[in-house]
Amino acid sequence: MAQSYFQSLFNSIADGGRDLIARNVRKSDRSGADRVVELCRALLTSRGEAAGAVLAREALEAYAALEDAEKPKLFYRLVVEFCPPEIEVTKAADAYRAAPTPANLAALVRASEPPRRELLRRLNMAPGGTAALVAMRQEVLAQMKERPELNALDEDLQHLFVSWFNRGFLELRRIDWHTPAVVLEKLIAYEAVHEIDGWEDLRRRLAADRRCFAFFHPALPDEPLIFVQVALVKGMADRVQPLIARHAEVKDPKQADTAVFYSISNCQSGLKGISFGNFLIKQVAAELQDELPNIKTFVTLSPVPGFRRWLDQEAKRDADVAQVHAAVEELGLADWQDEGGVAHLKEPLTQLGAWYLTRVKSGRLPLDPVARFHLGNGARLERVNWRGDVSAKGVRGACGLMVNYLYRLDQVERNHETFVNERKVVASRAVEQLAKASIPARKEVKEAKEAKKTDKADKAEKGEPQPGATPAHAD
Amino acid sequence: MAQSYFQSLFNSIADGGRDLIARNVRKSDRSGADRVVELCRALLTSRGEAAGAVLAREALEAYAALEDAEKPKLFYRLVVEFCPPEIEVTKAADAYRAAPTPANLAALVRASEPPRRELLRRLNMAPGGTAALVAMRQEVLAQMKERPELNALDEDLQHLFVSWFNRGFLELRRIDWHTPAVVLEKLIAYEAVHEIDGWEDLRRRLAADRRCFAFFHPALPDEPLIFVQVALVKGMADRVQPLIARHAEVKDPKQADTAVFYSISNCQSGLKGISFGNFLIKQVAAELQDELPNIKTFVTLSPVPGFRRWLDQEAKRDADVAQVHAAVEELGLADWQDEGGVAHLKEPLTQLGAWYLTRVKSGRLPLDPVARFHLGNGARLERVNWRGDVSAKGVRGACGLMVNYLYRLDQVERNHETFVNERKVVASRAVEQLAKASIPARKEVKEAKEAKKTDKADKAEKGEPQPGATPAHAD
Amino acid sequence: MAQSYFQSLFNSIADGGRDLIARNVRKSDRSGADRVVELCRALLTSRGEAAGAVLAREALEAYAALEDAEKPKLFYRLVVEFCPPEIEVTKAADAYRAAPTPANLAALVRASEPPRRELLRRLNMAPGGTAALVAMRQEVLAQMKERPELNALDEDLQHLFVSWFNRGFLELRRIDWHTPAVVLEKLIAYEAVHEIDGWEDLRRRLAADRRCFAFFHPALPDEPLIFVQVALVKGMADRVQPLIARHAEVKDPKQADTAVFYSISNCQSGLKGISFGNFLIKQVAAELQDELPNIKTFVTLSPVPGFRRWLDQEAKRDADVAQVHAAVEELGLADWQDEGGVAHLKEPLTQLGAWYLTRVKSGRLPLDPVARFHLGNGARLERVNWRGDVSAKGVRGACGLMVNYLYRLDQVERNHETFVNERKVVASRAVEQLAKASIPARKEVKEAKEAKKTDKADKAEKGEPQPGATPAHAD
Amino acid sequence: MAQSYFQSLFNSIADGGRDLIARNVRKSDRSGADRVVELCRALLTSRGEAAGAVLAREALEAYAALEDAEKPKLFYRLVVEFCPPEIEVTKAADAYRAAPTPANLAALVRASEPPRRELLRRLNMAPGGTAALVAMRQEVLAQMKERPELNALDEDLQHLFVSWFNRGFLELRRIDWHTPAVVLEKLIAYEAVHEIDGWEDLRRRLAADRRCFAFFHPALPDEPLIFVQVALVKGMADRVQPLIARHAEVKDPKQADTAVFYSISNCQSGLKGISFGNFLIKQVAAELQDELPNIKTFVTLSPVPGFRRWLDQEAKRDADVAQVHAAVEELGLADWQDEGGVAHLKEPLTQLGAWYLTRVKSGRLPLDPVARFHLGNGARLERVNWRGDVSAKGVRGACGLMVNYLYRLDQVERNHETFVNERKVVASRAVEQLAKASIPARKEVKEAKEAKKTDKADKAEKGEPQPGATPAHAD
């Protein structure tokens, strides 16, 4: 409704308001970025809200019409020109230094907030403003790699989005075959983990023994922000291909005992850094528990995206690993399709996978980004699955390994705390044993013994930051 | 839906998550404001979002349970304790002073933002968080009169609300007899201009020849933020009593030619300073134009809340006005009910009313707050109505005067600009003539003539800031 | 939507279609019932559907404009003039008699269906047609008492309504404070058992520890067909006044263990004979069980509308009963408000109540209409409550008695069968014992003994139709 | 909602009600059609509604589980066994014959209505009952070709559906990309005129310059009953391929002046004979006029399904036509794709097409079924389009001809009347001239002249039923 009102309004004041604006702003023969900046200035100084809404729309239209080459120029001008007066900022800073009271702090905050933020808030008044700003940030982020000076603009956008996309404003919606096509087509477009190959594929993913949930924001009613796909099955699934097979038989969800979260996809790259995912899984789990009391286990079936890259590196440092690596190199994609063709690699690779996930860190956190996400989220590393994903992508990235992370709602907080405070990977006993049987683990033990022999020093007991430390496990 | 999910979630993690939090926070035997502060600290440092949502709820529950006497204490602690480290702020300020680049500015903005803002954003994650924070600001505002130091907290809340209640997120909804009772009862409660006396009264106000529209925010689905009441009539209404009479005959809205906006009420005192009204009227006008092309005129029927107070003052300074004032004083409410009983005062009072509205200023703006609102909004002061409101309130506040402000969508921007830039009250020729015939105007002319005689100086031409300057008018 | 389309359509073809119809039908200067009949004939013979819809609307408008005196005339003409040709009917009947095949039966059905039915179906195409026809039947029913010949019209309407209001098309909706006022006001208007005294009263009846459900039909979206009011309480309520007290404390529904159905009201007298009620209670019970697993008992708190009338009669035939009756007659309404003031009547009256409900029949069914309804529905007569309803109405109709009928979903079918097939009132042991201790029961026993003595004939064993037979009971 | 309530209810009374039914009905070891008949009998005699709903569901489930070979048997038993007692029917018929009063007629109607109708009404109480009955009729219709005795069952179903699917209960909904996939997939399945080749094709058909509307019934919320596809274009479209090309540029609907109805498809073959189409076009036209005042012309682009068949026949009777026909026979589908390849046939074929449409009748109505539909609907035969549809289907059925039927809302009633009463095809002057220039027309004129010469008799003036009569035309 809001949309059509806007329409009426804009039409209504076209003769009056817009002509007036024309007198001031439109007579300009500027174009491109200059034109957008000019409209932004007008918007920022306008006092009538109706005029503001019109200007906001014109500015966003002018922005949408920009040629690609003009955008960096615009972004740069937004960064450098929409700043507060230096003198005001330093004056407020001096006052605060002299007396760091809450009032003086508030004055400093006020003085230093870039007018750009107010500009962005006003742009949001245009119809479709929120979507346009999210898209704008997507472009800012893309350019930031080469132009770090755009960071200030990105920071303002992110600051606004953190406010606007506050959890309290998001709505969890179930997605199924009753969902409008305009939303469904976005699942096809945004699915990032296991590609959806058209509408027939999608239909299977939304059948009676599947669930899909997404977060939405009221200002983007047709745009999922993030969505998760769940398979309701018997027992903890260890392979993804059967879950996403288009012609898989549809089972009765009342007979299932396990919900397998097999794909989570962020949809809006312009919302990077605004986290939705950690909340989503738990909320969906709670929802499923409500709908289907027969579901007792909530578990992911997740990729191990960094495993193969790590293995490539490790092979250069360790001759035994190199042997395994060479055997992997010999295989073609076809070999992976057959259980027998790769059976000889099952043991060493699953062990190395367990090692990689539990011991290999980047700083104090696991190197693997998916592990980092779920463990930080309070899940437990439950199982390493051999031939979990034998698609080209799964083989290329992780020698076909997939992992189950287990979410027990009554333990996520404790696990989360253990992970955050003690930096321990919470893993099942089985994964732990796999890791201990791996090549690097055996080597460590051997080295430790030898070290003990030589200088009686016992390094292996020191705790978790070093490779080889004992992770927490819980059964 | 979100609500019930929350419920499930909270129940689900009750055994785990909350017990865990208990270990840290609950073992405390603090209570009152101390307890709330403690929970706020925990919330601000928590890293798991689910834990965050639980803590947010607990903090708001603890706040809701506070005794009134504890609240000032809490607010004060929020102001003084949730500030950034002074050393960080001054360091960032120094860096900015040394090199006032956008990056350094961004760093200063980051460093000086009070953690209180992040705290408030996190509190919003609780179910009902937005409503709770709006209610909290209501209390902060109430206490600020005596405790100006709470301003910093108010400023943070307002800063958040400006973002959250951005025009782009509001939804205009029509209110009628098909609206849920939970919303309708709020109209009865919040109507601030012409009291609604129960459900039967309300029903008449929502009948076929009336319209009511309100702005809503998705996070407060049952709470109108502001609403406007409109009567669809033939000709510009000059009296309010017939419009709000419970038993007034319901006319066919297709026969009407005029929409009379006879009441605008803000609903949420916690949203003070976040303006919705100036946009509302124009958007409703656009909507009505769309629904009923037969409506050609959009006009208010507005009170003149400051007239009587001004008259009381003026009577002390001017003997002629004092005479009129004395005649007014002699009347009882009953006299006003009858046309004849007050006929002798019609001329002087309407003239004084016109003078008051067009010439009497506070600073550069009209003294009358309603005039300030509509004129600033781009409306034209169209007509002063004798015996427009003969209720006790209308007589007490404005000797029964009411005013029509005319909204012509094709002129609002021009009027607005004239009003803002030239500080001219845009009034019809008729109102202008009334004002010129008023006691103070005649006196001015006389004085001017005498002044001219004595020292040839012509004060009367100097322009609009002085009382008596010629306002703009447009016909 | 349909409505507004209709509107557009009617407007669109106004110049063409309606003028055309005018040529044929409108040139007529008929009025009143004649005019309606004329339009009905045109409608019945029209072949274009659009023209049909226009004619349907005109006919219903003409009907709505009829003066009351014209309506009987119209109804009579509908009865006698919209019949099939006698010759066709008898021809079809002869063919059937000669060969009673399904085909000949079908032909007879076709030949004998009055064109009036098709007329009524076509009238339904007008906007608001269904509502108009339901209202029409209300008037037909009102007149039928004096004009039994209208029965044929009533039968046609009822026949259509049975089809249109089939259970499969009804929607059960929960009614609460989120329901539109246009529906809520109908609860106030239609509540037939315990009057709702305005909106504040209604609000209490829809509070958190109350439930209200209604059946709706898609063609009457704002009109409840029947609704039931439920109180969620602890223990089986025995008095209605505390349940409907406006200021009764609102309790937590999660603490309740019993759902008390304390009022069921039919809303549309034009739908008389189309039963909704027996299904409603069970469906609501199922719904409550789903929402609140803590609710274990589903029970009514029902009036005994025929008790006092029966008592008045019985007092004339039985001297002992006459004594009780005389004591009742002495009391004023005020006496009933106080426990003590009527304590002496508790025993005899509750016993007589139990007797009345379990033994007194009209034909083979209980004389009391409410008992007939719930027992036929499969409920059990659970308890007779002293001073259950001490309002004027409750005292006047039933000496304040109220009854709990118990619905156990796992027994309703068996109870229903017992009631229907064996004509036994299914009652609890307690009610049974009350009945056996009543004056008439004691008298019967005495008479039986004496009869036994004299002629050894045992009348008391003969079964249930006679007063005094043993009803079934179940604990 | 209704659905889930049902679910709860059925589950709730499973232990009680269904076991009880089991005692009576389930102990039977019957199966197949016998079992269904048994359940139907139980349903028809059951008195408790809840039991009824359970039995209705069981009966429909048993029906759904029938093997195909059992269905004819079931249908036959429904026809012969669920009839009223012959003696009651003849008694009522006798009474009517003796005194054919409305009351006796009503009694006869009552006595002769087959219990089968009540059975069908009760089956509708089951969840999904309406859909099941519509599907059942589809099967009855399929078998009726070989088993005319099933007609009585079909007649009962149709009689019910005419009541249930009364225009007053249908809802017109716009279908677009915001419509749930569960509905959209049915468009793909049901489109009968110009096949939709998958989702991408569908998306183009629902783009901004297209419209699609369908009628829905509340009991079949996801099932369109009939839908129409409209292209918004400039000028009256003469070829369908550009309208349905997947990659056709999307134009601004505000620039269009014409709405082209290029496809109407009935969806439910079980609703055969219940007409929706004639109303749909006019209602959609009214709706479009409301949304887009720029649309001035409402026209179809329709196939001429019977043309080629007629041409084949005509070629056998007329040597000149045979020559044209032979030329057609020589062409392959590829030739039709090119303007030039078939140019030599344009004149004779469009003339023959015009002749076929305006003069060739079946009885008193046009032979062509599409012409019959639109002309009966009040449209005017506006234009015959050469190479309107050069798909295999279009060439095969009508030598590529397509026709525009023009709907002028202000003339449909007059046209309809002309068509119905005078049996004249209302055609434009251009079509009329084409027809007059055709081979058969020229031959008629020649024959007429010769006839005149010989016996002075003037046959050509006799009017319209004979081939060659002057049709009405209107410009």
Image (spheres, coloured by chain):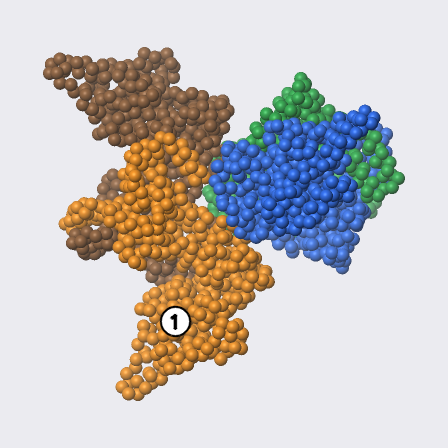
Chain colours: A blue, B green, C brown, D orange
Q: Which residue is drawn at 35% across and 47% down?
A: D66
Q: Mark 1 points at which residue?
A: D309
Q: Position of residue B356 (x, y in %)?
A: 68, 40
Nearest to the observer: residue D176 or residue B461: D176
Direction bottom: furthest residue: D453
Quadrant of the rendered image containing residue D432 = bottom left
The reply, left or right, for residue A60 in relation to residue A150 is left
Q: In which quarter of the image is the N terminus of chain D?
A: top left
Percent across and percent down for residue A258 are: 54, 36
Residue at screen point 82% across, 30% down: B86
Mark 1 lies on a secondary structure that is: helix
Farthest residue to the left: give it: C455
Crowding at mark 1 (Cα within 10 Å: few <14, some 14-19, many 20+): few
Q: Where is residue B367 in the image (x, y as percent from the top left)?
A: 70, 38
> Is residue A3 shown to the viewer in this render?
no
Residue at image x 35%, y 53%?
D139
How many numbered marks appear? 1
Name the chain letter of the residue that bears numbered label 1: D
